[in-house]
Image: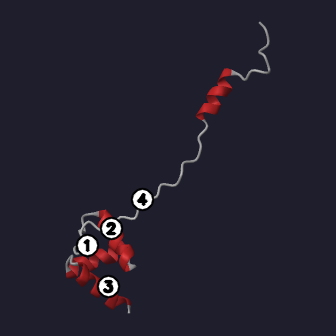
Amino acid sequence: MSHPDPARPHEHEEVEKSKARTPHAEHVEPEKGPHDPKEINPKMSSDIHYWAKEFGVTGDALHEAIRVHGTHVDKVRAVLNHHKG
């Protein structure tokens, strides 16, 4: 049995190199607007995320404001702004 040629990489080394993972680029969602600019849909996580960020509150605070005051953006905005100041 002859010794493998040191100039040629071993087959398993080539396989290992092909398995090496390169880091993926960070996934960034494009900034999307709300589903409806006048109504907040509390069942849509994208709406809750958007409006919570817009109003500077947590999702829980937004849900509570919607539960008490309804889903109209202007009413929710007024209530949340009133509680901030």
> CA–CA distance between discs 1 and 4?
19 Å
Q: Are marks 4 and 2 in contact (CB under 8 Å)?
A: no
Query: In this rendering, is residue 78 above or below 54?
Result: below
Residue 56 appears at what percent x and percent y? 40, 79
Residue 29: give its label. 4
Disc 3, disc 2: CB below 8 Å? no
**Drawn side of residue 60 relative to residue 13, left or right:** left
Disc 1 and disc 2 in contact, CB within 8 angstroms: yes
Q: Position of residue 77 (x, y in %)?
A: 29, 83
Gap between marks 3 and 1 measured at Cα? 17 Å
- Residue drawn at (58%, 47%) of the image: 23
| Residue 22 visible in the shown view | yes
**Mark 3, mark 4: which one is toward the viewer?**
4
* Viewer-proximal residue among 16 and 39: 39
Measure the alpha-carbon separation of dots 1 and 2. Answer: 8 Å
Question: What numbered label is drawn on residue 33?
Answer: 2
Badge 2 crowding class, 10 Å Cα cut-off, few under 14, some 14 to 19, many 20 or more, is few
Place of residue 10 in the rendered image (x, y in percent of width and height, measured from the top left): 70, 22
Q: Which residue is mark 3?
A: 80
Q: Which residue is mark 1?
A: 37
Q: Earlier in the sequence, mark 3 or mark 4?
A: 4
Relative to 2, is 68 on the left or the right?
left
Dot 4 alpha-carbon crowd within 10 angstroms: few under 14, some 14 to 19, many 20 or more: few
Q: What's under tag 1, amino acid-wise?
A: Pro
Left or right, residue 42 beside residue 7: left
State which tag comes first along the sequence, 1 or 4.
4
Q: Is residue 58 visible?
A: no
Quadrant of the rendered image containing residue 72: bottom left
Element carrying mark 2 = loop
Q: Secondary structure at mark 3?
A: helix
Q: What is the total number of numbered labels drawn onto the structure image? A: 4
Badge 1 element: loop
